[in-house]
Image (spheres, helix red, strand yellow):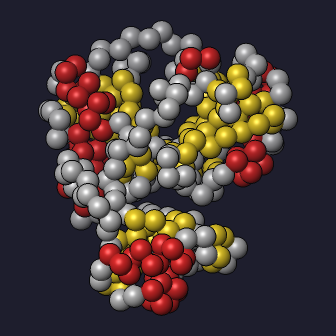
Amino acid sequence: PSQVAQCVKSLSSTMAEGPTNRLYVGNIPWSTTVDELRGIFSGCGTITLVDIPTGRQGRSRGYGIVEYSNVNEAQVAIQTLDGHTLGDRNITVREDKAPTKSAPSKSGGNRSTIGDTPAADGCRCYVGNLAWETNEESLIAHCSQVGTVVQAEVAKQPGGRSKGWGLVDFETPDAANSAINTLHNSDLQGRSIIVRLERAGGANKSGGPNAGRPEASSGLQIVVRNLPWSTTSEDLRQVFQQVGTVIKAEAVCHADTGRSKGWGTVLFENREQAQAAIQGFNGVELEHRPMQIKLDRYD
C-alpha cells in the first residue's frame, strides 16, 4: 500500500498524548540518503527506523522519519540536532505526531493582514501549496520576478512549522495581477503553487479557470487543496468515505505530464456529508501536509 493509504488508515484515530519516540526531520537536502540520516541521529540513541519518503519519480520529499527505542533518546535528539546544519540547510527536528489538526489562528482564521498591517486594495496575493522549507526570503525572491514585493509572510503553526501557505504584498495592483497570471501553477521548490488575489476579510478573487464564472454550488462537492504529490483519486476516496458515501473522488493532474496539481475534488451523496467532511478533515494532515478543504462553489 502507498504511504498515503497507510496514513489514511490512521486519520480517524485520536492523536496520542504525551511525548513520542518517533521524530519528524524536515528541510533535509534532496540528496540525503537513509544511511546518512541514520549516521547523524545514531549518536543520540538506538534507532529502530529511518525513512525518507519519496514521490512518484523517486525523488526525496525533503523530510525524513527517525524512530528511537524510547522517548528519552528521541528527546535528546531533538535538543541536540534541531537546527543542525546538513549540507546547505538547517534541519528541523520535532516529535512526529501526524495526523494532527492545525490549531486555529488567534485572529480567528482571517488572513487579511500581515503583521496587523492592512494591504492596499488589490495588492495582496494568497500563495498556497507551498513546500515546508519555503520561507519569506524564497517567497519574495520567486514573486519579485513580476514586480516589487513590499512584504511577505509564510503562515506558521504555534510550534513554528509552516502551514503551507503565505501572503505577499505587491507595490501595485498591476504587479499582483501579473503574479496571478504568471506565477499561478509555477514551480517553487518542487511544489506547483496557487496564486490568487486576497481581498480584505478573506474574500478571494481567483485568477484561475473559474474567474468570471457565476457561483452555482450544489453543496455536494468539496475542493481539497495542499495534497501530497502522491495522492491518488482512490486515496481521496478512502479518506472521505469515513464521513459518508463518496460518489466521485478525483485527484487533479496536469493533462500533458500527468503530474498532480496538489488538489482534488470529492462529491458526496448529500450536503450533510460534505459539511461533515469540511468540519472533520479541514486542517488534518496527510503525509505532513494539512489539507485545506472548502465547498466547491462552481460544481
- The picture places residue 270, in percent across and down from the top left corner, at 18, 21
- 281 vs 125: above or below: below
Whether residue 49 can be seen here: no
Q: Is residue 45 left or right of residue 210?
A: left
Q: Residue at x 56, y 17 (%)?
A: 201
The total number of labels drawn is 0
Whether residue 104 can be seen here: yes
- The picture places residue 44, in percent across and down from the top left corner, at 45, 86
Q: Is residue 66 left or right of residue 267?
A: right
Q: Quadrant of the N terminus?
A: bottom left
Q: Is residue 240 left or right of residue 133?
A: left
- The picture places residue 66, in percent across and down from the top left corner, at 40, 76
Viewer-side residue, 299 vs 289? 289
Q: Quadrant of the C terminus?
A: top left
- 100 vs 82: above or below: above
- The picture places residue 181, in percent across and down from the top left corner, at 69, 30
Residue 76: image quadrant is bottom left
Viewer-side residue, 33 vs 56? 33
Q: Residue at x 14, y 33 (%)?
A: 245
Residue 5: image quadrant is bottom left
Viewer-side residue, 72 vs 93? 72
Q: Residue at x 32, y 65 (%)?
A: 19
Q: Residue at x 55, y 21 (%)?
A: 202
